[in-house]
Every structure is written in C-alpha cells, then in structure tokens.
Image (cartoon, helix red, strand yellow):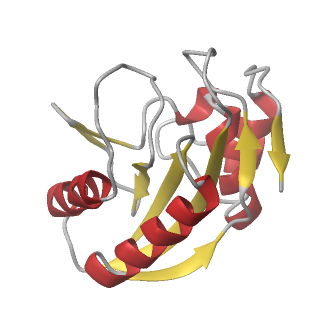
Amino acid sequence: MNKVYLLTGGNEGDRLEHLKQAAANIDLFCGQIMQLSSVYQTEAWGKTDQPAFLNQALVMRTAMDPADLLHQLLVIENTMGRRRTEKFGPRSIDIDILFFNEEIIDRPGLKIPHPELPYRRFALEPLDEIAPLLIHPLFHKTIHQLLQECADPLDVKKI
C-alpha cells in the first residue's frame, strides 16, 4: 500500500461541506483515509480578489499508482463542480497530491512532491498538524522546518 498526503481546499459555495464531500469521495474511490487535519481558513493565494479558502490536509493509503490516483482525484473534482477557467481562480474544490510515499516524480501534469509546497503556508500549516516530522525528499527537511522557514505572509487560521 502507498502512503499519500493530500491537500483539499476551496472557496466557492459551502466550503466546509465541500471538504467533507471530497474526503468521503477520496475514501470511497481512492483508498482509506488514515488521518485528517483541522480545517484552516486562508486568504486567497496568487489571485487575491476572491473569497477566503478553507483547506485541509489528509493522509491516506491506496493501492493506486500516482497517475491513476491523480486521474481519480481529477474525476472527483469534476463531479464536485470544479471548473478550470482561471489560473488561481475561485473553485469549489481542489485536491493536490503533496507526497506519494517518498517518490520524486517529474512528468508533464504530475509533479510529486508538489513543487510549490515549501512556499505555501496554507498547505504547510495543516500538513504540519498531522505530519510535522515528515521529511521532504528533495529539501531533506521536516514539514515543521519548512513551515518555520516559509516566507509566505498569508494569514492561516485554524477554525
């Protein structure tokens, strides 16, 4: 079984319900969720003239390989109403693969670990709650260390 860390988030509609639905769909269609972080509210990153996001990290076990998991996560996003019309734009749900075991994958459309993770407080805060000692395979630092070094000024609040 593969151990995977994901980040879910969204800023449209009933944000909390969308996170719950995403977790239920992941557990049903992708593998067993082992742990969920608290939910965090963050102002929008990248395109700031939009509502605040809710984000949650989770760890799961799956028999899927990375490409199949990504495909299924995109299906879940689509069925939950995700439309990719604007980069960094508002969305009902976003599901990112942060880590897949200790693998390093760099293919078009699939980059693991998530390349922006060390620079985004909204991802590091919830991940630090559930896996502070997890080692980033490229930076060779713990999630907690990356969070302490993160220069992202966005305010991230546990709700």
Side of 133 where 33 appears, left or right: left
Residue 12 location, x and y as percent? 53, 42
* Residue furthest to the front: 13
Instruction: Using the image as rendered, state which of residue 76 and residue 96 is in the foreground.
Output: 76
Estimate the x, y position of residue 30 in percent, counting from the top left.
Answer: 29, 75
Residue at figure coordinates x 16%, y 55% from the top left: 67
Image coordinates for residue 95, horizontal then vertical, percent: 41, 51
So how many labels did they put on this image? 0
Q: Residue at x 43, y 54 (%)?
A: 99
Where's the C terminus, which quadrant? bottom right
The residue at the point 39 percent across, 63 percent down is 101
| Quadrant in the picture for the N terminus | bottom left
The residue lying toward the viewer, choosing from 45 and 78, is: 78
Vertical placement of 42 versus 35: above or below?
above
Report x, y in % for residue 121.
70, 34
Name which residue lies at 33% across and 44% down: 82
Q: Quadrant of residue 43?
A: top right
In this rendering, the answer to whether 115 lies above or below 98 is above
Quadrant of residue 19 within the rendered picture: bottom right
Quarter of the image for residue 120 reads top right
Going by the image, does 158 lie left or right of 52? right
Residue 8 appears left or right of 120: left
Q: Is residue 113 positioned above or below 22 on the image? A: above
